[in-house]
Amino acid sequence: MPSSTSKQISYPCPLIGNSGDYIESAKVNWGHFVERFPKKVIFHFQKPEITDERLQALFDSGEINAFVEFNSASTFNFFSKKLDFSKGDTFPIEINYGELNRKVRLRFFLASSKDMVINPQLLASDFPSSDFLAKELDMLGKSKAVTEYIDHNFDPFLSNASSIFMITPNDDADVKSQIVDFENDKINIKLPKETFKKYQFIKKDENIPMIHCAIAFPVLVDAFNIINKLDKSPNDMDDDDDIDKLNYSEKRWFMRLKEFKEIRNLRGDAYEMANKLLNNPVIKLINSNYLQDKNISEGDDYE
Amino acid sequence: MNNLKILKEKIQTKLVDQVKDSNNIEEETDKYKTQKNPFIFSPEDFINTPFDEIEINCLDANNDFLTAKYLFETIKIDRIQASEQRLWTTLTHTVGWDYMQGRWNIENTRKATNLKEFILTRWHYKPGSIRTALARNAFSRLWWAAELTHAPWEKDQKFNCFKTDDPYKYTKILSENNKSQAIVDVLEREFGGSLLFRICFLEAFNILVEEKGLTPTLASAKLSVLFNALLIPSSVSAHEENPEDLLAKILKLQEYINVKKSPENE
């Protein structure tokens, strides 16, 4: 029996999560968290909660199963795993190093474990009948895509690639001001050629906390502004935001800062987040007594 | 044998910026048209890798399959390393220069081609989706074509039904002459990430071309669209299919393909 009310995709059965198939209160709550290790990641999936009580009962009795689909574009890996909650309310899936990298899209599905007639509680009122036939593995629910960033935090070619900034000279002699380029894996801070020469001289000094203040801090604020903008719901985004998303969301700096934001629980506006991540750079600068403190050293590739 | 060296990230970024930010794209284009490589690097511009060096005469601009096989057998990297753009950009600007002039010669592009985008796509990394970038760079597309298709039965026994003596059976189907559309369709579409989906697609594509005589370019383009449409409403069950059943379903899609027979097969 076709899903008569689906507005976008026609599935064999009505789906919770497919616009118009169920009434608005029909929802499935999915949850998970990720543990990261150098050579593997472990996803811990929580048992889904279904607001349709009849579907929940079928799920609890094993007549409906849950699946997660992984899509890792940068490793060309696209696969699905069944989630087994028979032994508890969470189910771990271990993924070996090399299978997932960078931006990983997850989608969750509910599917029938056998041929059966289902009569949900919250089916859309314009569906032609109160029940429908589901065949084995027919989809009964789908989630919106969620993204995880799996950055293995290592350099495959033995140089320092874990940092998110780099400082380079701008070859265009006519450009006299600093330009920041967010379009590569690292944020590229291009200094005018003459300024770059001076910078190279300065960086030989072991004490350059001013780098954080004068160069990295404002750029980091801009970077968090981009991240905050793209974290808005799709309805709040304008056309420019979409372009940014396309350009930035797969870049290493973007993924790493998103990860930092979660791990270090950075909240507030972009300034507050950058300030917290760099641990009060302005105060550090003042307290460091500028170039006399020899305790801190930085390269030109740094976090 | 020497070790493969790759450009430092700063050098690689500078190269791409020269194309992206150039006010004089003709000047940049001329560089990429030059038979003799105009890019000169110093030893300090490179870092060493533990991998074997590439030999110029093993890159065959007239044979995608042989070049894919050579790259795959020589550069023993994992998938995370293979998604790094520095390696592929280094090859296009150094040892692979002659290959680039033969395979992706700018003089042979169509009149309407945006040359800046062409250079960024084939010599560097196409901005946007990483899947597309990897599928378009002249060398990464070939390494990945081999990686994704080499002896699937060694990765999963359920592919024994398609097993032959040739571990490169599917690499050939994907990359032999006149089938570059298939590389685009498999590498750029989501289903190309699934071993099951891409091997069954290639098996069906090969049957349509070799046995039914359809033109490779149109067969691949149309079959991939139809296959994608088949997968969307049945993504859970499709992942669970056995290869022979899925192949039968894909072959059924030919009813909806109305393409001319390949002249060479008539």
Image: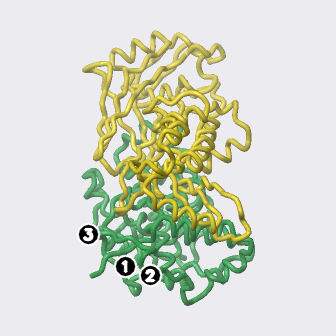
Chain colours: A yellow, B green
On the same chain: label 1 and label 3? Answer: yes
- Determine the chain carrying the residue at label 1: B
**Residue at left offset 30%, top offset 54%:** B159
**In the image, residue A276 lies at what x, y percent?**
51, 33
Give residue B139's position: percent from left, percent from top: 47, 71
Residue beneath label 1, please?
B54
Q: Which residue is mark 3?
A: B165
Res A75 seen here: no
Q: CA distance from mark 2 to mark 3?
A: 32 Å
The residue marked by circle 3 belongs to what chain? Answer: B
Q: Which one is earlier in the sequence, the residue at label 2 or at label 3?
A: 2
Residue B102 figure quarter:
bottom right
Residue B102 lies, with reference to residue B208, above or below; the image says below
Picture quadrant of residue B67: bottom left
Q: Secondary structure at mark 2?
A: loop
- What residue is pinned by disc 2? B95
Question: Closer to the camera, B137 or A243?
Answer: A243
